[in-house]
Amino acid sequence: MAAHCPKCNYKLKLSDWRPECPKCGVNVLYYGIEEELRKEADTAEYHYAKRQPKFDRLKFSLIGHPLSIVRIALGLLPIVATLLPMGTVEYVLPFGTTHSQVNLISIINFLINSDIKNFDLLLGLFNGILVGKAMIFWAVALVSLVLMVLVTLIGWFFLTLSCSPKGMRRNIGFPIVGIVLSTVSFVSFNLMIKALSASLPGIFTGSANPTAYIAAVLIFVAMIVINVIYKRKNIPVKYKDVSEYLIPYSERPSTIAKQKEKEEAPAAEPVNA
């Protein structure tokens, strides 16, 4: 056993099978383990102190203020607005008349239930003389609507990072983009209806319902207003004080104070038998 005692450097022999050093009596196996555990605890507390401000900002972005809660609640409502009827269309065909309302669910069902032949037919209509222009407006309206939904989802996710350096810019920028896309979708849908009604008189009729568009725009505007108020109030983030954990345990004021108290404490008097 070619090892030495970690305290007195006594060379241990094969006959020294006990865990204690025969010279100084210290436990060779566990000597210094408290210091190692303290170092590991210091490292864990240091990383905790580094992460805590991020957690505080996340918490404050979600529930740190009544405006934060309202902002999170409004974040997904523009998508709910697209579930309202955005318009109605009616086709008069030889085998009957088809009347349907247009909203996000009906568009998704149409795309899911359409097979490859239907998509080929739709692509062919873009080159049609009568309805080609109307189909372009339809494609622009559909793409703008899908992008608006995606922007809303992404913006809602970034609301959790509202207290980051660029959080306020994103919180205002995403609703502005949502308003633009909603407007493009609504205008393109109107132009499609007008173009189809003019190209297919007596066969196609339709009308746009501004309720969904107005609801979505009002929600986006409300989110912008809330963020502007948030910015003007300059509401500070409530951080948990973890500065002590950034200092090594042995150098902390509380540790030094405890050590002084221990050193200055009077020694206990021996009890007489």
Image (cartoon, grey):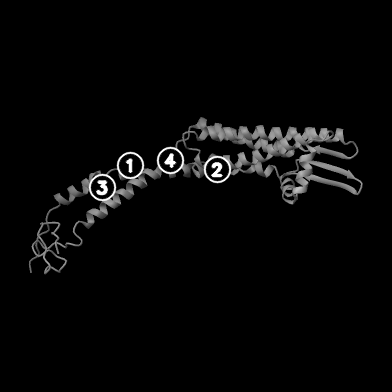
Disc 4 target residue: 238
Distance in Å between CA atoms under marks 4 and 3:
25 Å
In this rendering, position of residue 214 left or right of residue 166: right
User: As shown in the figure, which amino acid type bears the numbered disc 4?
Assistant: Lys
First-in-chain label (4 vs 3): 4
First-in-chain label (4 vs 1): 4
Residue toward you, 11 or 49: 11
Residue 100 placed where, x, y %?
A: 81, 46
Labelled disc at residue 249: 3
Crowd tier of the residue under label 4, counting other residues whose Cα lies within 10 Å: few below 14, some 14–19, many 20 or above: few
Check the picture and name the quadrant holding the C terminus. Answer: bottom left
Crowd tier of the residue under label 1, counting other residues whose Cα lies within 10 Å: few below 14, some 14–19, many 20 or above: few
Disc 2 target residue: 157
First-in-chain label (2 vs 4): 2
Crowd tier of the residue under label 3, counting other residues whose Cα lies within 10 Å: few below 14, some 14–19, many 20 or above: some
Residue 58 placed where, x, y %?
A: 47, 43
Residue 43 placed where, x, y %?
A: 31, 48
Residue toward you, 163 or 91: 91
First-in-chain label (2 vs 1): 2
Distance in Å between CA atoms under marks 3 and 2:
38 Å
- State whether residue 187 is above or below residue 75: above
Disc 1 target residue: 243
